[in-house]
Image (spheres, helix red, strand yellow):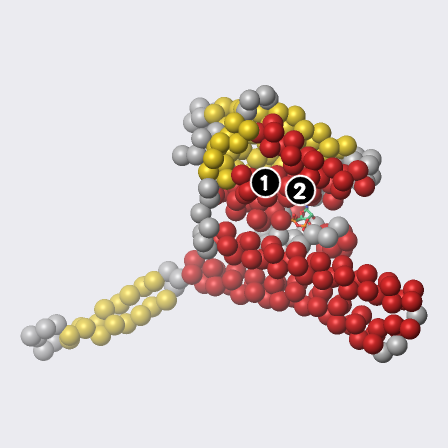
Amino acid sequence: LEIHLVPMTMSGEEESGLLLVLQDVSAIRRLERMRSEFVANVSHELKTPVAAVKGFAETLLAGAVNDPETARSFLTIIQDESDRLNRLIGDILELSKIESRRSPLQFSPIDLPMFLGRMKELLSADAARKSITLDVQSEEGLFLEADEDRLGQIVMNLLQNGINYTPEGGKVKVLAEIVVDEDTEEELVRITVSDTGIGIPKKDIPRIFERFYRVDKARSRSSGGTGLGLSIVKHLTELHHGTIRIESTVGVGSRFILELPLIQP
Ligand code: ADP
């Protein structure tokens, strides 16, 4: 709570008064704290790959370049870390674009079975590399009003996570169906992305959509994650007036349940 005393002089009167203003600033302070935490996190996340690139370049220049095998392995690290840096910058820019509402969504009708088929194609090589079965099921003729690129980002992020956090030989499935909201009786499209992966501990589920929150930092890193995918998913879902929730059992698998209005309100 902030207290301000503002002196007042009434016009034409000698007597002056004091105005007491009580202002609840907790929401503002919380926002400021979140913002500065985010900036600190971003700096840390960016510095790590830059330090790696610099370190390995220096070692190469100091002589390691003369051993072809070492040189090749260090250059591969430099390449991977530069890719990570690129992904991070892309995700940070995307998040800031979404949050500042600079690019409004462009809604159009989307043929969901066709759309999901395309997503599957885009990820089939990634899935095949880990011998993961990618299965898409959707009612025929299911149309949904959405921003096609943004819906693509949502579904791609969920599918990519499914593949990343599922061991070799597992299964990732997308199911699209129409459901009726019990409260509003409104028709919704439910897209469920489920996997037979490592699962998410109960205590982590409430925080999983936070920026840079990861259950296992090393694992996220080695799978190329930025820690921003799910916060982008959450934002984009909200911009579509939808909801997303998670059901998960450690060691068994996870299910991300996305519900979007059939027609945008
Ligand atoms: P990341 O780039 O680390 O994957 P995300 O924001 O996409 O970042 O996800 C945040 C964290 O949530 C991940 O680091 C991982 O711990 C957990 N997670 C996300 N999807 C899954 C999943 N399908 N199975 C298990 N854990 C998951």
Which part of the image, by quadrant, shows the N terminus?
Answer: bottom left
Query: In the rendering, at what x and y percent does residue 97 appear?
Result: 50, 54
Instruction: Say above or below: 205 vs 113.
Output: below
In the image, what residue type sits under mark 1? Gly
> Which image quarter holds the C terminus?
top left
Q: Which of marks 2 and 1 is in front?
A: 1
- Count of picture labels: 2
Question: Which residue is more in the foreground, 244 or 33?
Answer: 244
Q: Position of residue 208 (x, y in %)?
A: 62, 47
Q: What residue type is labelled 2?
A: Lys
> In this view of the protein, which residue sits in the foreground, 120 or 22?
120
CA separation, marks 2 and 1?
28 Å
Which residue position is annotated with label 2?
202
Report the residue at 71% width, 66% height from top. 48
Q: Is mark 2 on a helix, strand or loop?
A: helix
Residue depicted at 51% across the width and 33% down the height: 260
**Left or right of 6: which side holds 210?**
right
Q: Is residue 189 visible?
A: no
**Does ligand 1 reach within 8 Å of label 1's beta carbon?**
no
- Above or below — where is 135 with respect to 27? above
Horizontal and vertical percent for residue 18? 21, 72
193 on left or right of 189: right
User: Which residue shows up at 12% across the image and 76% down it?
Assistant: 15
**Quick one: label 2, few (<14), some, or many (20+) residues within 10 Å?**
few
Q: Earlier in the sequence, mark 2 or mark 1?
A: 1
Q: Horizontal and vertical percent for residue 134? A: 73, 32
Name the residue nearer the viewer: 12 or 3: 12
Which residue is pictured at 56% across the width and 61% down the height?
38
From the image, tell me which residue sits under label 1. 152
